[in-house]
Amino acid sequence: MDTERIRAIEEEGKKAFAEADSEESLRELEVRFLGRKSELTGILKGLKDLDAEEKRTVGPLVQGVRVALSEAFSAAAERIAREGRDWEAERIDVTAPGVSDPMGHLHPITSLIHEIEDIFTGMGFGIADGPDVESDFYNFEALNFPADHPARDMQDTFWVDSDGLDTRYVLRTHTSPVQVRYMETHTPPFRIIVPGRTFRCESTDATHEHTFHQFESLVVGETGSVTVGHLKRVAETFFSEFFGRSITVRLRPSYFPFVEPGFEFDISCVFCGGKGCPACKNVGWLEIGGAGMVQQKVFEAAGYPRGKYQGFAWGFGLERLAMMKFRIPDTRMFMSGDLRFIRQF
Ligand code: PHE
């Protein structure tokens, strides 16, 4: 066997691979030097016909050349790929200004809740919350809703399919159930607010939405220590700070089963100060929600002894406040998920 020839193939192949200047020519060279019909492969195949002595010398030599040529091929392939790249196009301008990712921000209702929490924690209030899916007991029963009260009607309440459960569940229709939950685990005196999501099974329009937010307040102390006067004063302090102008509160007699006495709660118009304008329909007052002194039956449902404590509570609509603060015309915008709306805040 001609070992000279084998060495010559190695030299020729290395030189050819080193000089190859395109992928096509490299592919041809691969076939010529390493392919199935190449001279080298022919020699490899012929090894079996050699005698033992020759096999021992020629075998390793051919194998070595094969490896060397494979490596030369790989090196050439890499070189050609590198040379083929458009370095100018790939240039990175490290001095160019950065491209920032768009950042989200808080929903206006969330920001408003934070703002309200700031004002109330400043007045010594704690913050409590409860579940959105609530049992009949906390949403109605413990709040002294008689069994046939119209607010339990399908029209107002989203009933949750409670088949097989020991009690009926609803999407809470107000934040008041948290009053009872909180009182079950705390002893007066305390003052809390409860911001949260609420649900009503109603048809929607510019002032009604099935999913909305309220914030509850509950202040309880020994009998005689918490009065309607406190309710009014705390509310006036809050609203004046919230709207950045002096606000007065008006209470009108009303009925909620869990307060006695109960009130409709109005504030002086935040736009005209009470003189009368289109926003307040010229009456000078804006309706904000319900309020009152906690019914003793609610204290009892929470496990307090009758007559020991006295307290006030209110439940205000957050969207209403947001609409006044930011002059938003339609309450459905809050839950619309429309980014053109959200981005304005
Ligand atoms: N929970 C009542 C509602 O949603 C509001 C309210 C709260 C009234 C607390 C009185 C006291 O309509």
Image (spheres, rainbow, N blue to C red):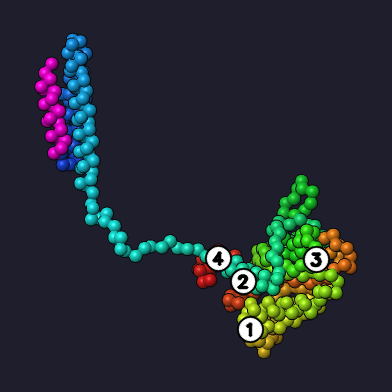
Whole-angstrom CA distance, mark 4 to mark 1, is 25 Å
Q: Is residue 273 above or below residue 129?
A: below
Amino acid of disc 2? Glu
Q: Secondary structure at mark 2?
A: helix
Identify residue for label 2.
Answer: 115
Would residue 24 be seen by someone viewing this image from the given angle? yes
**Region in magenta:** 1-19
Identify residue for label 3.
Answer: 188
For label 1, being within 8 Å of ligand 1 is answered no
Asked if labels 1 and 2 touch by Cβ distance under 8 angstroms, the answer is no
Q: Residue at x 23, y 52 (%)?
A: 86
Residue 106 tag number: 4
> Does the segment drawn in magenta span residue 14?
yes
Depth order, front residue of 162/219: 219
Identify residue for label 1.
Answer: 245
Whole-angstrom CA distance, mark 3 to mark 4, is 34 Å
Looking at the rendered image, the quarter that the N terminus falls into is top left
Q: Residue furthest top?
A: 51
Whole-angstrom CA distance, mark 2 to mark 4, is 12 Å
Residue 154 falls left or right of residue 275: right
Q: Nearer the viewer, mark 3 or mark 4?
A: 3
